[in-house]
Image: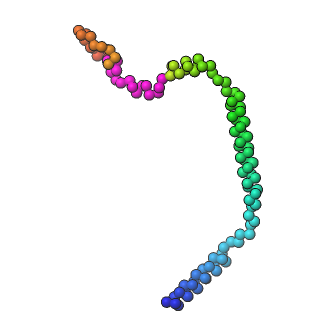
Amino acid sequence: MKNDESNLRDRFQFLKSQDRALAPEFTGQPQPRGRWVLNYRLAGAALALILLAGFSVKSFLHRPEPAEVSIAQISHWRAPTDSLLETPGGELLRTLPQFGENLTTSEIK
């Protein structure tokens, strides 16, 4: 069993040496870290200035409407789901039947 273990170790050593021989060498110098940090700071500052300019232009150009206009708009507003509350034959439920009248099919739409 000891012979099998040493044989296995020799094989692994051989594979390691082959990997080292075939692996590319990494001789390139890594980029300095400070250079990228400066670019992120510059980009963050530029973004902050753009946002500040956008908000200031928006607040400068925005003119509030008089209260009467907004009240009139709200009073004419209808919910988009109001049509779901209308049922077929709903006009029959809004009227009272009169005795002695015949209900014709032309009255029902």
Q: Residue 66, image x and y in percent?
A: 62, 19
Q: Which residue appears at 71% of the width and 69% of the height?
A: 26
Q: Which residue appears at 32% of the width and 18% of the height?
A: 93
Location of residue 16 with respect to 52 vertically, above or below: below
Q: Residue 12, image x and y in percent?
A: 58, 81
Q: Which residue appears at 24% of the width and 10% of the height?
A: 99
Which residue reaches farthest left?
A: 100
Asked if residue 79 is among those painted magenta in the image, a careful observer would answer yes
- Taking depth in this image into account, of 94 and 8 the one nearest to the observer is 94
Q: Residue 81, image x and y in percent?
A: 44, 28
In the rendered image, which quarter is residue 14 located in? bottom right
In the rendered image, which quarter is residue 104 located in? top left
Q: Which residue appears at 40% of the width and 27% of the height?
A: 84
Q: Residues in magenta?
A: 78-92
Which residue reaches farthest top?
A: 100
Asked if residue 29 is among those painted magenta in the image, a careful observer would answer no
- Taking depth in this image into account, of 33 and 24 the one nearest to the observer is 33
Q: In this view, does 94 lie to the left or right of 44?
A: left
Q: Residue 42, image x and y in percent?
A: 75, 48
